Amino acid sequence: MIARMECLPCLVRQAKEAVCMSSGDPDLRLRILRRCLAWMAEADLDVSPPEIAAGIGRIVMELSGRDDPYREVKSLHTDMALKLLPRMDRMLAKSADPFLTGMRLAIAGNIIDLGARSQVEDADIGDTLREAMELPILGEDPEDLRRETGRAGSILYLADNAGETVFDRKFIQQMPRGRVTVAVRGGPAINDATLDDARAAGLHEVAELVSNGSPAPATVLADCSPSFQRLFAEADVVISKGQGNFESLSGVDRKVHFLFRVKCPLVADHTGYPEGSLLLLHSRG
């Protein structure tokens, strides 16, 4: 999915927020933001929105000297999600279909997205948790994914945001143990999960963790490490979490199961499903 002119206001918001998190110096903030705006003015829109966001992140980190401006926010979101673990465990214990409930929990966690919104509070996550249990999952039949993961020798799970990974953990626990590898970002990218963030969420307890080698807030295959590209090509099943991963991989030449919540009108237009929808889609490959 390539960017459109309508993506630019959201990218400007992301740039402003990243700049404010990177420095308390007003003069430095303004200098960094001006550099970001100048770069965006010349950016190629024939790429996915996360690829443009990656360029913004590089400028902010280079000029501010902060290697991870969102570190404190990611830690906060992970702590918020970890507090909900007992509630999630009760929901799974009472469920007649733990796999489907785990999938719903994973989608619920996709609300923790500072690429699509400015702020996430405890109440937002709690409300979304309730909503995700009630709304239909649109797109593909979840039974297809259940069958594929059940017979797969290897499952590659592409993580998205820090905090969200706590919810992913509950879904991964419903899959065959020892067959899941979770890939995270190769460097700081907005509030997306890196290896440290994934370990803080406890993902290392339920799956093998790997870095994709890229600091983009998505899975931009051309920018990922050769080892990750091989893993992506050879996995029996690939599950892609989050809207950013969908934006970067929706045209890829292999079957990928996309699991996310629609958070912007352009993605709604691209998928044919309204904003707020819980989606399970797959590329045909």
Image (tube, rainbow, N blue to C red):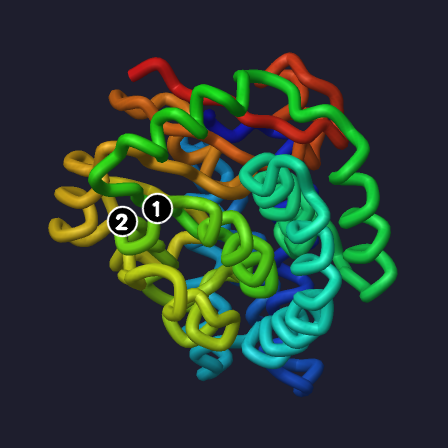
Q: Residue 251's spot in the image, x, y percent?
A: 36, 22
- Residue at disc 2, secondary structure: loop
> Gap between marks 2 and 1, in whole Å?
6 Å
Residue located 67% across and 30% down the image: 278
Pointer 1: what residue? 176
Q: Residue 157's spot in the image, x, y percent?
A: 37, 46
Within-10-Å neighbours for mark 2: few <14, some 14–19, many 20+: some
Residue 9 visible? The answer is yes
Quadrant location of the C terminus in the rendered image = top left
Amino acid on which the number 1 mark rests in the picture = Pro
Q: To which quarter of the image does residue 82 belong?
A: bottom right
Pointer 2: what residue? 179
Q: Are marks 2 and 1 in contact (CB under 8 Å)?
A: yes
Left or right, 119 with respect to 216, comes to: right
Q: Residue 241's spot in the image, x, y percent?
A: 49, 42
Left or right, 111 with respect to 183, comes to: right
